[in-house]
Image (cartoon, coloured by chain):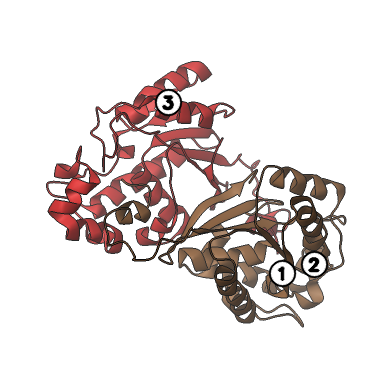
Chain colours: A red, B brown
Amino acid sequence: MPTDRQNVNNGMTTQPETAPLSPTTIDLLRHGQVATPDLFCAPSHEPLGISGWKQLTLATQTGQWDAIITSPSRRCHDFARLLAQRLDCPFAVDARFGEMDFGDWVGQTQAAIWEQDAQLLQQLWYQPRRFIAPHGEAMEDFIARVNQAWMQLQTDYAGQRVLVLTHAGVMRVVLAKVLDILYQKSLHFEIGYAQLTRIRIYPDGIASLVGHGLPQA
Amino acid sequence: MPTDRQNVNNGMTTQPETAPLSPTTIDLLRHGQVATPDLFCAPSHEPLGISGWKQLTLATQTGQWDAIITSPSRRCHDFARLLAQRLDCPFAVDARFGEMDFGDWVGQTQAAIWEQDAQLLQQLWYQPRRFIAPHGEAMEDFIARVNQAWMQLQTDYAGQRVLVLTHAGVMRVVLAKVLDILYQKSLHFEIGYAQLTRIRIYPDGIASLVGHGLPQA
Protein backbone atom coordinates (compact mmCIF):
# COMPACT_ATOMS: atom_id res chain seq x y z
CA MET A 1 0.00 0.00 0.00
CA PRO A 2 1.41 3.40 -0.83
CA THR A 3 2.90 5.44 1.96
CA ASP A 4 0.32 8.15 1.99
CA ARG A 5 -2.15 10.01 -0.13
CA GLN A 6 0.59 12.24 -1.47
CA ASN A 7 1.66 9.26 -3.56
CA VAL A 8 -1.63 9.39 -5.32
CA ASN A 9 -1.30 13.07 -6.12
CA ASN A 10 2.30 13.08 -7.27
CA GLY A 11 2.24 13.48 -10.99
CA MET A 12 -1.27 12.11 -11.19
CA THR A 13 -3.57 15.06 -10.75
CA THR A 14 -3.57 18.26 -12.71
CA GLN A 15 -0.72 20.44 -11.54
CA PRO A 16 -1.59 23.94 -10.35
CA GLU A 17 -0.57 26.66 -12.78
CA THR A 18 1.64 28.41 -10.26
CA ALA A 19 4.73 26.71 -8.92
CA PRO A 20 3.81 24.49 -5.96
CA LEU A 21 4.54 25.90 -2.52
CA SER A 22 6.69 23.97 -0.10
CA PRO A 23 4.90 22.05 2.61
CA THR A 24 4.71 23.63 6.03
CA THR A 25 6.27 21.59 8.82
CA ILE A 26 5.04 22.30 12.33
CA ASP A 27 6.71 20.61 15.27
CA LEU A 28 4.85 20.69 18.58
CA LEU A 29 7.23 20.15 21.46
CA ARG A 30 5.98 19.54 24.97
CA HIS A 31 7.89 21.31 27.75
CA GLY A 32 10.20 19.30 29.99
CA GLN A 33 9.71 18.30 33.61
CA VAL A 34 9.07 21.22 35.97
CA ALA A 35 10.94 21.93 39.18
CA THR A 36 8.15 20.97 41.61
CA PRO A 37 7.37 17.26 41.43
CA ASP A 38 3.94 15.66 41.10
CA LEU A 39 1.86 18.66 40.11
CA PHE A 40 -1.27 17.93 38.16
CA CYS A 41 -0.83 21.20 36.28
CA ALA A 42 1.97 23.62 37.10
CA PRO A 43 1.25 27.33 37.52
CA SER A 44 2.42 29.62 34.74
CA HIS A 45 5.43 30.88 36.74
CA GLU A 46 6.74 27.36 37.51
CA PRO A 47 10.20 26.92 35.97
CA LEU A 48 11.66 23.85 34.34
CA GLY A 49 13.73 21.62 36.59
CA ILE A 50 17.27 20.62 35.69
CA SER A 51 16.10 17.42 34.07
CA GLY A 52 13.50 19.40 32.11
CA TRP A 53 16.22 21.59 30.64
CA LYS A 54 18.20 18.51 29.72
CA GLN A 55 15.19 16.86 28.09
CA LEU A 56 14.50 19.89 25.91
CA THR A 57 18.16 20.36 25.05
CA LEU A 58 18.37 16.78 23.85
CA ALA A 59 15.08 17.02 21.95
CA THR A 60 16.18 20.10 20.01
CA GLN A 61 19.89 19.57 19.52
CA THR A 62 19.73 18.61 15.84
CA GLY A 63 16.53 20.40 14.85
CA GLN A 64 16.37 23.33 12.48
CA TRP A 65 13.48 25.76 12.43
CA ASP A 66 12.66 29.02 10.70
CA ALA A 67 10.60 30.34 13.60
CA ILE A 68 9.80 29.48 17.21
CA ILE A 69 6.46 30.14 18.89
CA THR A 70 5.81 29.52 22.55
CA SER A 71 3.15 29.34 25.20
CA PRO A 72 3.66 32.16 27.73
CA SER A 73 4.20 29.68 30.59
CA ARG A 74 7.76 29.76 31.94
CA ARG A 75 8.19 26.02 31.42
CA CYS A 76 7.85 26.65 27.68
CA HIS A 77 8.89 30.27 27.27
CA ASP A 78 12.27 30.24 29.04
CA PHE A 79 13.70 27.47 26.91
CA ALA A 80 12.04 28.64 23.68
CA ARG A 81 13.53 32.12 23.97
CA LEU A 82 17.05 30.80 24.46
CA LEU A 83 16.66 28.33 21.61
CA ALA A 84 15.50 31.12 19.29
CA GLN A 85 18.59 33.11 20.26
CA ARG A 86 20.84 30.13 19.57
CA LEU A 87 19.22 29.48 16.19
CA ASP A 88 18.96 33.21 15.48
CA CYS A 89 15.38 32.85 14.31
CA PRO A 90 12.14 34.81 14.84
CA PHE A 91 10.44 34.24 18.17
CA ALA A 92 6.85 34.88 19.22
CA VAL A 93 4.70 34.28 22.29
CA ASP A 94 1.12 33.19 21.63
CA ALA A 95 -1.11 32.85 24.69
CA ARG A 96 -3.51 30.67 22.72
CA PHE A 97 -0.89 27.91 22.88
CA GLY A 98 -1.05 28.04 26.69
CA GLU A 99 -2.37 25.02 28.58
CA MET A 100 -6.05 24.68 29.40
CA ASP A 101 -6.82 26.79 32.48
CA PHE A 102 -7.46 24.27 35.25
CA GLY A 103 -8.63 26.98 37.66
CA ASP A 104 -8.40 25.88 41.30
CA TRP A 105 -6.51 22.73 40.35
CA VAL A 106 -3.45 24.62 39.15
CA GLY A 107 -0.48 24.05 41.43
CA GLN A 108 -2.10 21.12 43.26
CA THR A 109 -0.89 17.55 43.21
CA GLN A 110 -2.94 14.95 41.47
CA ALA A 111 -3.40 13.10 44.77
CA ALA A 112 -4.93 16.20 46.36
CA ILE A 113 -7.30 16.71 43.43
CA TRP A 114 -8.30 13.06 43.59
CA GLU A 115 -9.24 13.48 47.23
CA GLN A 116 -11.35 16.58 46.59
CA ASP A 117 -12.78 16.01 43.14
CA ALA A 118 -12.40 12.37 42.13
CA GLN A 119 -15.48 12.37 39.94
CA LEU A 120 -14.55 15.52 38.10
CA LEU A 121 -11.03 14.23 37.51
CA GLN A 122 -12.47 11.10 35.99
CA GLN A 123 -14.72 13.16 33.78
CA LEU A 124 -11.65 14.76 32.24
CA TRP A 125 -10.77 11.33 30.84
CA TYR A 126 -14.15 9.84 30.14
CA GLN A 127 -16.23 12.85 29.10
CA PRO A 128 -13.58 15.46 28.35
CA ARG A 129 -15.75 17.60 26.11
CA ARG A 130 -17.96 18.54 29.05
CA PHE A 131 -15.11 19.11 31.48
CA ILE A 132 -14.55 22.36 33.37
CA ALA A 133 -12.23 22.51 36.39
CA PRO A 134 -13.49 24.61 39.35
CA HIS A 135 -13.09 28.26 38.23
CA GLY A 136 -11.38 26.94 35.13
CA GLU A 137 -11.77 27.08 31.38
CA ALA A 138 -14.39 24.99 29.57
CA MET A 139 -12.96 22.31 27.33
CA GLU A 140 -14.99 23.62 24.41
CA ASP A 141 -13.46 27.08 24.81
CA PHE A 142 -10.00 25.61 25.14
CA ILE A 143 -10.40 23.59 21.96
CA ALA A 144 -11.73 26.63 20.10
CA ARG A 145 -8.82 28.88 21.03
CA VAL A 146 -6.17 26.28 20.21
CA ASN A 147 -7.77 25.54 16.85
CA GLN A 148 -7.88 29.24 16.08
CA ALA A 149 -4.17 29.60 16.82
CA TRP A 150 -3.43 26.44 14.84
CA MET A 151 -5.23 27.69 11.74
CA GLN A 152 -3.53 31.07 11.89
CA LEU A 153 -0.12 29.46 12.31
CA GLN A 154 -0.52 27.63 9.03
CA THR A 155 -1.26 30.88 7.23
CA ASP A 156 1.37 33.02 8.92
CA TYR A 157 4.18 30.51 8.46
CA ALA A 158 3.18 28.82 5.18
CA GLY A 159 6.07 26.91 3.66
CA GLN A 160 8.27 27.25 6.76
CA ARG A 161 9.50 24.93 9.50
CA VAL A 162 8.08 26.08 12.81
CA LEU A 163 8.61 24.88 16.35
CA VAL A 164 5.87 25.42 18.95
CA LEU A 165 6.79 24.98 22.62
CA THR A 166 3.58 24.01 24.30
CA HIS A 167 1.62 21.62 26.54
CA ALA A 168 0.17 18.12 26.33
CA GLY A 169 -3.44 19.33 26.28
CA VAL A 170 -2.72 21.70 23.42
CA MET A 171 -0.99 18.93 21.49
CA ARG A 172 -4.04 16.70 21.91
CA VAL A 173 -6.30 19.37 20.46
CA VAL A 174 -4.03 19.72 17.44
CA LEU A 175 -3.75 15.94 17.00
CA ALA A 176 -7.53 15.69 17.01
CA LYS A 177 -7.78 18.46 14.43
CA VAL A 178 -5.10 17.05 12.12
CA LEU A 179 -6.45 13.51 12.25
CA ASP A 180 -10.05 14.74 12.09
CA ILE A 181 -11.04 12.76 15.18
CA LEU A 182 -12.77 13.59 18.45
CA TYR A 183 -10.63 15.05 21.22
CA GLN A 184 -11.42 11.96 23.31
CA LYS A 185 -9.57 9.77 20.82
CA SER A 186 -6.41 11.82 21.26
CA LEU A 187 -6.16 10.43 24.79
CA HIS A 188 -4.80 7.25 23.18
CA PHE A 189 -1.61 9.18 22.38
CA GLU A 190 1.08 9.22 25.03
CA ILE A 191 2.76 12.59 25.30
CA GLY A 192 5.84 12.53 27.50
CA TYR A 193 8.01 15.45 28.60
CA ALA A 194 9.97 17.06 25.76
CA GLN A 195 8.31 14.82 23.21
CA LEU A 196 7.73 16.08 19.74
CA THR A 197 4.85 15.72 17.31
CA ARG A 198 5.63 16.59 13.70
CA ILE A 199 2.85 17.66 11.36
CA ARG A 200 3.21 18.49 7.70
CA ILE A 201 0.72 20.55 5.77
CA TYR A 202 0.87 20.16 2.02
CA PRO A 203 0.06 22.88 -0.50
CA ASP A 204 -3.29 21.21 -1.21
CA GLY A 205 -4.23 21.77 2.45
CA ILE A 206 -3.94 18.13 3.52
CA ALA A 207 -2.33 17.72 6.95
CA SER A 208 -0.39 14.58 7.85
CA LEU A 209 1.05 13.28 11.06
CA VAL A 210 4.68 12.60 10.17
CA GLY A 211 5.97 11.70 13.59
CA HIS A 212 4.97 11.49 17.22
CA GLY A 213 6.95 10.87 20.36
CA LEU A 214 10.19 11.52 18.54
CA PRO A 215 13.15 11.58 20.89
CA GLN A 216 14.87 14.13 18.69
CA ALA A 217 13.77 16.49 15.99
CA MET B 1 -2.38 18.31 31.63
CA PRO B 2 -1.17 14.88 32.63
CA THR B 3 0.73 12.86 30.09
CA ASP B 4 -1.86 10.19 29.67
CA ARG B 5 -4.61 8.34 31.38
CA GLN B 6 -2.11 6.12 33.15
CA ASN B 7 -1.37 9.11 35.34
CA VAL B 8 -4.88 8.94 36.62
CA ASN B 9 -4.62 5.30 37.49
CA ASN B 10 -1.22 5.33 39.13
CA GLY B 11 -1.77 4.97 42.82
CA MET B 12 -5.29 6.28 42.54
CA THR B 13 -7.45 3.29 41.87
CA THR B 14 -7.63 0.10 43.85
CA GLN B 15 -4.64 -2.04 43.07
CA PRO B 16 -5.33 -5.54 41.80
CA GLU B 17 -4.62 -8.27 44.33
CA THR B 18 -2.12 -10.03 42.12
CA ALA B 19 1.13 -8.34 41.18
CA PRO B 20 0.57 -6.10 38.16
CA LEU B 21 1.68 -7.50 34.82
CA SER B 22 4.16 -5.60 32.72
CA PRO B 23 2.80 -3.69 29.77
CA THR B 24 3.13 -5.26 26.34
CA THR B 25 5.11 -3.23 23.83
CA ILE B 26 4.45 -3.93 20.17
CA ASP B 27 6.55 -2.26 17.51
CA LEU B 28 5.22 -2.34 13.98
CA LEU B 29 8.01 -1.79 11.49
CA ARG B 30 7.32 -1.19 7.83
CA HIS B 31 9.64 -2.95 5.38
CA GLY B 32 12.28 -0.93 3.51
CA GLN B 33 12.35 0.06 -0.14
CA VAL B 34 12.08 -2.86 -2.54
CA ALA B 35 14.44 -3.58 -5.45
CA THR B 36 12.04 -2.60 -8.27
CA PRO B 37 11.23 1.10 -8.22
CA ASP B 38 7.80 2.69 -8.42
CA LEU B 39 5.60 -0.32 -7.77
CA PHE B 40 2.20 0.43 -6.31
CA CYS B 41 2.34 -2.86 -4.39
CA ALA B 42 5.24 -5.27 -4.76
CA PRO B 43 4.60 -8.98 -5.29
CA SER B 44 5.34 -11.27 -2.38
CA HIS B 45 8.62 -12.52 -3.87
CA GLU B 46 10.03 -9.02 -4.45
CA PRO B 47 13.21 -8.57 -2.39
CA LEU B 48 14.39 -5.48 -0.55
CA GLY B 49 16.79 -3.27 -2.45
CA ILE B 50 20.16 -2.25 -1.02
CA SER B 51 18.73 0.95 0.41
CA GLY B 52 15.86 -1.02 1.93
CA TRP B 53 18.32 -3.22 3.82
CA LYS B 54 20.14 -0.14 5.03
CA GLN B 55 16.91 1.51 6.16
CA LEU B 56 15.88 -1.52 8.22
CA THR B 57 19.37 -2.01 9.64
CA LEU B 58 19.39 1.59 10.85
CA ALA B 59 15.85 1.35 12.22
CA THR B 60 16.63 -1.73 14.32
CA GLN B 61 20.22 -1.18 15.38
CA THR B 62 19.50 -0.23 18.96
CA GLY B 63 16.19 -2.02 19.47
CA GLN B 64 15.65 -4.95 21.79
CA TRP B 65 12.80 -7.38 21.38
CA ASP B 66 11.72 -10.66 22.97
CA ALA B 67 10.14 -11.99 19.77
CA ILE B 68 9.91 -11.13 16.09
CA ILE B 69 6.87 -11.78 13.89
CA THR B 70 6.79 -11.15 10.19
CA SER B 71 4.58 -11.00 7.15
CA PRO B 72 5.48 -13.82 4.74
CA SER B 73 6.46 -11.33 2.00
CA ARG B 74 10.17 -11.41 1.23
CA ARG B 75 10.52 -7.65 1.79
CA CYS B 76 9.59 -8.29 5.45
CA HIS B 77 10.56 -11.91 6.01
CA ASP B 78 14.18 -11.87 4.79
CA PHE B 79 15.26 -9.11 7.12
CA ALA B 80 13.11 -10.28 10.04
CA ARG B 81 14.64 -13.75 9.99
CA LEU B 82 18.20 -12.44 10.05
CA LEU B 83 17.35 -9.95 12.81
CA ALA B 84 15.85 -12.75 14.92
CA GLN B 85 19.06 -14.74 14.45
CA ARG B 86 21.19 -11.75 15.47
CA LEU B 87 19.05 -11.11 18.56
CA ASP B 88 18.68 -14.83 19.22
CA CYS B 89 14.96 -14.48 19.82
CA PRO B 90 11.86 -16.44 18.80
CA PHE B 91 10.69 -15.87 15.25
CA ALA B 92 7.31 -16.53 13.65
CA VAL B 93 5.66 -15.92 10.28
CA ASP B 94 2.02 -14.84 10.38
CA ALA B 95 0.30 -14.50 7.00
CA ARG B 96 -2.39 -12.33 8.60
CA PHE B 97 0.22 -9.56 8.84
CA GLY B 98 0.66 -9.69 5.06
CA GLU B 99 -0.36 -6.68 2.97
CA MET B 100 -3.87 -6.34 1.59
CA ASP B 101 -4.14 -8.45 -1.57
CA PHE B 102 -4.35 -5.94 -4.40
CA GLY B 103 -5.14 -8.64 -6.97
CA ASP B 104 -4.35 -7.56 -10.51
CA TRP B 105 -2.64 -4.41 -9.30
CA VAL B 106 0.21 -6.28 -7.63
CA GLY B 107 3.49 -5.72 -9.43
CA GLN B 108 2.18 -2.79 -11.48
CA THR B 109 3.37 0.78 -11.27
CA GLN B 110 1.07 3.39 -9.85
CA ALA B 111 1.12 5.24 -13.18
CA ALA B 112 -0.14 2.12 -14.99
CA ILE B 113 -2.93 1.62 -12.47
CA TRP B 114 -3.91 5.26 -12.78
CA GLU B 115 -4.28 4.84 -16.53
CA GLN B 116 -6.46 1.73 -16.22
CA ASP B 117 -8.40 2.29 -13.01
CA ALA B 118 -8.18 5.94 -11.98
CA GLN B 119 -11.57 5.94 -10.31
CA LEU B 120 -10.94 2.80 -8.34
CA LEU B 121 -7.55 4.09 -7.20
CA GLN B 122 -9.21 7.23 -5.91
CA GLN B 123 -11.77 5.16 -4.07
CA LEU B 124 -8.97 3.56 -2.08
CA TRP B 125 -8.33 6.98 -0.56
CA TYR B 126 -11.77 8.48 -0.39
CA GLN B 127 -13.99 5.46 0.31
CA PRO B 128 -11.48 2.86 1.46
CA ARG B 129 -13.98 0.72 3.34
CA ARG B 130 -15.70 -0.23 0.08
CA PHE B 131 -12.51 -0.79 -1.87
CA ILE B 132 -11.66 -4.05 -3.66
CA ALA B 133 -8.89 -4.18 -6.28
CA PRO B 134 -9.66 -6.30 -9.40
CA HIS B 135 -9.44 -9.93 -8.23
CA GLY B 136 -8.24 -8.61 -4.90
CA GLU B 137 -9.21 -8.75 -1.23
CA ALA B 138 -12.08 -6.67 0.13
CA MET B 139 -11.01 -3.98 2.58
CA GLU B 140 -13.48 -5.28 5.15
CA ASP B 141 -11.90 -8.74 4.99
CA PHE B 142 -8.41 -7.28 5.20
CA ILE B 143 -9.32 -5.25 8.28
CA ALA B 144 -10.91 -8.29 9.90
CA ARG B 145 -7.89 -10.55 9.44
CA VAL B 146 -5.40 -7.94 10.66
CA ASN B 147 -7.52 -7.20 13.73
CA GLN B 148 -7.74 -10.89 14.47
CA ALA B 149 -3.95 -11.25 14.31
CA TRP B 150 -3.53 -8.09 16.38
CA MET B 151 -5.79 -9.35 19.18
CA GLN B 152 -4.09 -12.72 19.29
CA LEU B 153 -0.65 -11.11 19.39
CA GLN B 154 -1.55 -9.27 22.57
CA THR B 155 -2.57 -12.52 24.24
CA ASP B 156 0.30 -14.67 22.98
CA TYR B 157 3.00 -12.15 23.88
CA ALA B 158 1.50 -10.47 26.96
CA GLY B 159 4.14 -8.55 28.89
CA GLN B 160 6.77 -8.89 26.19
CA ARG B 161 8.42 -6.58 23.66
CA VAL B 162 7.51 -7.71 20.18
CA LEU B 163 8.59 -6.51 16.75
CA VAL B 164 6.29 -7.06 13.77
CA LEU B 165 7.77 -6.63 10.30
CA THR B 166 4.86 -5.64 8.12
CA HIS B 167 3.26 -3.26 5.61
CA ALA B 168 1.78 0.23 5.58
CA GLY B 169 -1.78 -0.98 5.09
CA VAL B 170 -1.51 -3.35 8.03
CA MET B 171 -0.10 -0.57 10.19
CA ARG B 172 -3.05 1.65 9.29
CA VAL B 173 -5.50 -1.03 10.39
CA VAL B 174 -3.72 -1.36 13.73
CA LEU B 175 -3.52 2.41 14.20
CA ALA B 176 -7.26 2.66 13.61
CA LYS B 177 -7.90 -0.12 16.13
CA VAL B 178 -5.61 1.30 18.81
CA LEU B 179 -6.93 4.85 18.47
CA ASP B 180 -10.52 3.60 18.09
CA ILE B 181 -11.01 5.58 14.88
CA LEU B 182 -12.23 4.75 11.39
CA TYR B 183 -9.69 3.28 8.97
CA GLN B 184 -10.14 6.36 6.79
CA LYS B 185 -8.68 8.57 9.53
CA SER B 186 -5.50 6.52 9.60
CA LEU B 187 -4.71 7.92 6.14
CA HIS B 188 -3.62 11.10 7.94
CA PHE B 189 -0.60 9.19 9.23
CA GLU B 190 2.48 9.15 7.02
CA ILE B 191 4.18 5.77 7.01
CA GLY B 192 7.57 5.82 5.31
CA TYR B 193 9.88 2.91 4.57
CA ALA B 194 11.40 1.30 7.66
CA GLN B 195 9.35 3.54 9.94
CA LEU B 196 8.23 2.28 13.27
CA THR B 197 5.01 2.64 15.22
CA ARG B 198 5.23 1.76 18.91
CA ILE B 199 2.11 0.71 20.79
CA ARG B 200 1.91 -0.13 24.46
CA ILE B 201 -0.85 -2.20 26.00
CA TYR B 202 -1.28 -1.80 29.73
CA PRO B 203 -2.46 -4.51 32.10
CA ASP B 204 -5.88 -2.86 32.28
CA GLY B 205 -6.24 -3.41 28.52
CA ILE B 206 -5.79 0.23 27.52
CA ALA B 207 -3.69 0.64 24.37
CA SER B 208 -1.62 3.78 23.79
CA LEU B 209 0.29 5.07 20.82
CA VAL B 210 3.74 5.75 22.25
CA GLY B 211 5.54 6.67 19.06
CA HIS B 212 5.11 6.87 15.34
CA GLY B 213 7.56 7.49 12.55
CA LEU B 214 10.46 6.83 14.85
CA PRO B 215 13.77 6.78 12.98
CA GLN B 216 15.15 4.22 15.41
CA ALA B 217 13.65 1.86 17.91
Say which residue label 1 marks. B99
Dot 2 alpha-carbon crowd within 10 angstroms: few under 14, some 14 to 19, many 20 or more: many
The kind of residue tagged 1 is: Glu
Say which residue label 2 marks. B73
**At which x and y percent is residue A8?**
68, 59
Q: Quadrant of residue A122?
A: bottom left
Image quarter (top left, top right, bottom left or bottom right) of the N terminus of chain B: top left
The kind of residue tagged 2 is: Ser
- Is there any visible trace of residue A38 in the rendered image? yes
Question: How many numbered circles are shown?
Answer: 3
The kind of residue tagged 3 is: Trp
Contact check, label 2 and label 1, Cβ < 8 Å? yes
Label 1 residue SS: loop
Nearer the N terminus, badge 2 or badge 1? 2
- Residue A53, which numbered label? 3
Give me the residue at 29% from left, 63% from top: A126
Q: As displayed, is residue B26 above or below residue B63? A: below
Q: As displayed, is residue A13 above or below residue B92? A: above
